[in-house]
Amino acid sequence: YEMLRSLVGSEMCIRDSLTYVEALKQEKKMSNNLKETISNLQKDFTANPKNAVVQYESNSILKEGLQSVVTLREHKLVVDEPKSFGGKDEGPSPVELILAALATCQEITYKAFATAAGINIESVSVKLKGELDLQGFLALNKNTRPGFQSISGTVDIKSSSPKAEIDKLIDTVNTHCPVLDILSKGVPIKLFQKVSSSSNNKEHIEQRASAA
């Protein structure tokens, strides 16, 4: 019995080792593919700067209560508010998505630049907190901004690379992270309001514009 248990244990150990080796090979293959993709993009955009300009789109519609359905390319996302705020809590809130956008953009930017520079990154994760005073949103205090008062958090980087390389990587990421740039420096916004109403079987459409 002891011999059988030892053999089974050895087989499981070998299987786990093979699985680990395969995972390493897969990770290396993915890293090589990513590095090649980044290199090709850099070459293309250097030769053809116009190709580097891309547009992103978001289409959403309010469905019921405070819940909206968002379409992003082929992806759909339910956005909602917590029950304590009058929602059904069937999805993240808009301001939570702001935090998620910053966190994931940091992680992606770390991975992209680390791969391009040949810096080993075992993992990167981000925890963020945003402080918001609802007096601003509910128009209770005109001196209170409706958006986040502040955003803070921690980027947890696990790497065996030298400190100098990681320090340089951190500076590079904080300089080139798109969402960090958007939130910290702001971006021109133009919103056009198309107001439609039906009365006497005639549709009236009025278009307005606002900027921020």
Image (cartoon, rainbow, N blue to C red):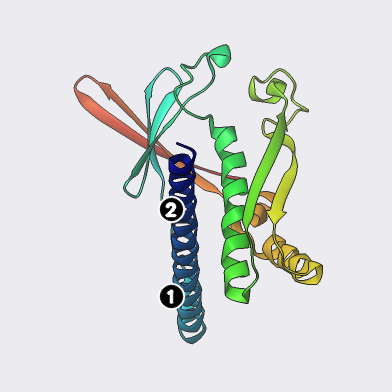
Q: Residue furthest bottom?
A: 47
**Labelled disc at residue 14:** none
Q: CA distance from mark 2 to mark 1?
A: 47 Å
Rendered residue at 54%/19% (across/down)? 82
Question: Few, some or many C-alpha atoms within 10 Å of disc 1 (few <14, some 14-19, many ≥20)?
Answer: few
Tell me if 31 is positioned left or right of 184 in this view: left
Image coordinates of residue 185 in percent, x first then y, are 70, 54
Q: Is residue 188 visible?
A: no
- Tell me the amino acid under the disc marked 2: Arg
Rendered residue at 29%/30% (across/down)? 204
- Tell me the amino acid under the disc marked 1: Asn
Which quadrant of the figure has residue 169?
Answer: bottom right
Residue that badge 2 annotates:
15
Q: Quadrant of the C terminus?
A: top right
Image coordinates of residue 39 in percent, x first then y, are 50, 79
Residue that badge 1 annotates:
51
